[in-house]
Image (cartoon, rainbow, N blue to C red):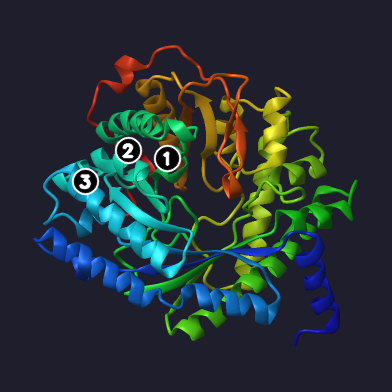
């Protein structure tokens, strides 16, 4: 039973500590929309999305009013479009037509993002996969709400270096195609290793082929709640610190579980998972960086940062799995630079570098996320950075991702403005020594020895 003290505590989290449900994401399978005729595919996709998601936003708003819990985003994820459009799409422009259809459907039902303009190419690329990847710059430039993700590696298959090389080029082309908006298109494009099928967060969400026809996944967030809880035990030992984080994560996850169950019942769609990632926003007091500072660091990037982040991530997961039997997605701590004011301050102070961020990704949920780099960064350099991050995911059997934004026309010391939840970011210097010959080898980096489990 819930007692009055827990009610008061939850209200305090919502009103003063930025507790919210970051997203309700409705996953929709589009496998039954495949057809050899492009117009038929587009029609089927539009009709299925607008039918299945017709009441998603309304349901989210109703739950927000009923429980008093902010639900920041309502989103949709769909089957990787490279699979859905394989029979109908003969050139990249055909895939752009599907992207525009997704965008229209998203606007019709009122969601802020739709994910799944994706391809899964960790071992090799089909003709369809390559066409979709080549279409990404135009698709993201000509749509508003479409998000794209490409999975180029996994622990079981290794890393597809042909895809890594191609994605470096695609990131640069996407930056150029959206240069009028500080290369904003790259903020909607993420490259994965070990991408999960049930991630509710953008830009990496897609509806995996192992999922049901439709599913509800919920992403909760509460960096401000964790930070406030740690303030109360300032100076305590690590045991007390860990217990505090764990108990707080439990409470946050229970809120997400409640909303997930209610949304599932209201929409008559099965509940999938709760993703208990600590996802920051540009709002003051809603920062993972501030948690690290409360743990005892002057700025993120100082010695001890990786250890502090590892501790935080582990305790969040331990608390979350006690609160829900279905924890999934990414689940841990995000460190997107542009979306976290504390991370922005650390970069501006010269404490946080790209290399230190890469080290931190060994122990956190995702990877190099929402990082603005100079607009003249070479495609091969970006491919090299992607390869490094994919290797971390492959070897450590975890999800890693790269969302780099080469801001065309800007360099180190300048600032890229993305607006809204995406925030702003100081442009970080990149190691400019060449990796051209490495990236140019092609082929596939084999799976690690510990991938053999049979």
Q: Is residue 409 visible?
A: yes
- Point out residue 264 in the picture as x, y percentages from the top left corner: 49, 80
Decide which of tag 1 and tag 3 comes sooner along the chain. Answer: 3
Q: Which of the two residues, 57 or 241, is positioned nearer the viewer here?
A: 57
Mark seen at residue 137: 2
Q: Which structural element holds mark 2?
A: helix
Mark 1 and 2 residues: CB-CB less than 8 Å, in contact? yes
- Point out residue 447 in the picture as x, y percentages from the top left corner: 32, 40
Q: Tell whether 234 sits left or right of 70.
A: right
The residue beneath circle 3 is 129
Q: Quadrant of the N terminus?
A: bottom right
Q: Is 283 rendered above or below residue 424? A: below
Q: Residue at x 34, y 45 (%)?
A: 142
Q: Tell whether 6 sits left or right of 140.
A: right
Q: Residue at x 42, y 40 (%)?
A: 185
Q: Residues within 10 Å of mark 3 (few under 14, many from 20)?
A: many
Q: Residues within 10 Å of mark 1 (few under 14, many from 20)?
A: many
């Amino acid at each position: 039973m819930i007692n009055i003290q827990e009610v008061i505590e939850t209200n305090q989290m919502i009103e003063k500590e930025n507790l919210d449900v970051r997203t309700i994401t409705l996953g929709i399978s589009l496998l039954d929309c495949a057809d050899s005729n492009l117009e038929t595919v587009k029609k089927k996709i539009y009709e299925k999305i607008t039918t299945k998601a017709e009441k998603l936003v309304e349901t989210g708003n109703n739950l927000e009013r009923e429980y008093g819990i902010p639900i920041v985003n309502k989103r949709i994820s769909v089957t990787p479009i490279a699979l859905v459009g394989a029979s109908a799409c003969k050139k990249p422009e055909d895939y752009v037509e599907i992207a525009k259809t997704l965008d229209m459907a998203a606007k019709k039902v009122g969601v802020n993002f739709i994910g799944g303009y994706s391809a899964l190419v960790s071992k090799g690329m089909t003709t369809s996969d390559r066409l979709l990847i080549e279409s990404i710059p135009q698709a993201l430039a000509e749509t508003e709400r479409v998000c794209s993700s490409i999975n180029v590696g996994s622990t079981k298959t290794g890393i597809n270096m042909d895809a890594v090389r191609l994605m470096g080029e695609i990131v640069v082309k996407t930056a150029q195609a959206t240069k009028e908006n500080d290369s904003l298109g790259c903020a909607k494009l993420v490259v994965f290793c070990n991408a999960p099928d049930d991630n509710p967060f953008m830009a990496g969400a897609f509806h995996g082929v192992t999922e049901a026809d439709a599913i509800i996944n919920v992403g909760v967030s509460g960096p401000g709640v964790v930070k406030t809880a740690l303030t109360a035990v300032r100076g305590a030992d690590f045991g007390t610190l860990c217990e505090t984080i764990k108990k707080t994560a439990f409470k946050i996850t229970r809120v997400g579980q409640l909303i997930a169950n209610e949304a599932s019942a209201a929409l008559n769609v099965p509940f999938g998972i709760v993703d208990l990632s600590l996802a920051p926003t540009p709002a003051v007091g809603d920062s993972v960086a501030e948690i690290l500072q409360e743990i005892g660091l002057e700025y993120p990037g100082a010695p001890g940062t990786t250890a502090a982040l590892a501790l935080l991530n582990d305790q969040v997961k331990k608390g979350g799995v006690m609160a829900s039997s279905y924890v999934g997605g990414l689940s841990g701590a995000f460190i997107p630079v542009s979306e976290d004011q504390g991370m922005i301050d650390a970069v501006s102070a010269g404490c946080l570098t790209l290399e230190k961020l890469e080290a931190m990704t060994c122990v956190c949920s995702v990877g190099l996320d929402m990082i603005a780099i100079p607009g003249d960064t070479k495609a091969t350099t970006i491919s090299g950075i992607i390869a490094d991050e994919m290797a971390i995911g492959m070897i450590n059997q975890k999800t890693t991702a790269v969302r780099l934004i080469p801001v065309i026309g800007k360099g180190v010391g300048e600032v890229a403005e993305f607006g809204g939840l995406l925030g702003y970011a100081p442009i970080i210097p990149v190691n400019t020594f060449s990796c051209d010959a490495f990236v140019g080898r092609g082929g596939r980096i084999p799976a690690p020895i510990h991938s053999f489990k049979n």
